[in-house]
Image (cartoon, helix red, strand yellow):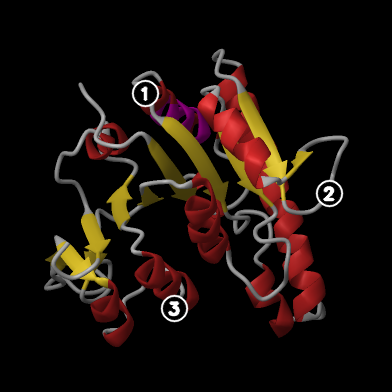
Amino acid sequence: MSPKYKRILLKLSGETLGGKRGTGFDYDTIRALAESVISIHNLGVEVGIVIGGGNIFRGSKSAEGNVGRVAGDHMGMLATVINSICLQEMLEQRGILTRVLSAIELNAIAEPYIKRRADRHLEKKRVVIFAAGTGNPFFTTDTAAVLRASEVGAEIVIKATKIDGVYDKDPKLHSDAVRYDVLNYDEVLKKHLKVMDATAIAFCRDNQLPILVLDYQEPDAILRAVCGETVGTLIKQRGS
């Protein structure tokens, strides 16, 4: 198989690492995700990854309880670091050189995020996991993913979810939900489709960064997508 892209950014939700429960760690699921990353890495594709922290703590929900939003978001950022270290371990157990670059300085366990350093790691075929979001509260890991993708020149953001694309309504609740093959950014925003937060979608639109939403549970879905097969839903600039 021949890859269509030289450099990609893979966005994973924290809930993905939790498997069917969506919380904690399902190591069989994490190993399967690692194998998907290895399959595209072995093709020579340069891989960056951003992982959410929702399987441990979701900062955006913290304001509903006793933790303030800023503190909650910082806790959520640290949850993404834990997830990043976990995936790093799974990859390195299989001989794949991996670096965790954190937007918050945690020098004992991760390198600080510096764009030039990220570029060098990717050029040397190391998988780079970007942790701690943007390093700022009030921004989601979706926004962090598209920001890092643009900074390092990724050609596409692949959002791996538990649903095989973007639907006009929730397919789990509506049997007549219709899946889109292709969308443009304005359609996503206008129709309030639950793909990424509006800030991330607008950023991709302004920087003409395509997003591919797919089901990571489909056999070889990420590999097939990287090789140019039609998988999931592609969000791109109108007419491009």
**What residue sits right under mark 1 in the picture?**
39
Residue 228: image location, x then y, percent: 19, 38
**Label 2 crowd bin: few (<14), some (14–19), many (20+), radius 10 Å:** some
Residue type indicated by callout 1: Ser
The secondary element bearing badge 3 is classed as helix
Residue bounds of the magenta highlight: 29-37
On screen, residue 16 above or below 32: below
Viewer-nearest residue: 33 or 121 = 121
The residue at the point 60 percent across, 54 percent down is 55
Res 153 label: none
Q: Nearer the viewer, residue 145 or 231?
A: 145
Q: Indicate left or right for 189 with 29 as reference.
A: left
Does any portion of residue 103 appear in the rendered image?
yes
* Residue holding disc 3: 198
Q: CA distance from mark 1 to mark 3?
A: 31 Å
The magenta stretch spans residue 133: no
Mark 2 and mark 1: Cα distance apart in space = 31 Å
Provide residue 88's location: percent of width, then percent of height: 63, 30
Q: Who comes first in sequence, dot 3 or dot 2?
A: 2
Asked which secondary structure carries label 1, the reply is helix
Which residue has dot 2 on it?
105
Q: Residue furthest top?
A: 95
Q: Pick whichever of labels 1 and 3 is earlier in the sequence.
A: 1
Circles 2, 1 touching at the beta carbon (< 8 Å): no
Residue at the image point whose x is 20% and y is 75% from the top: 168
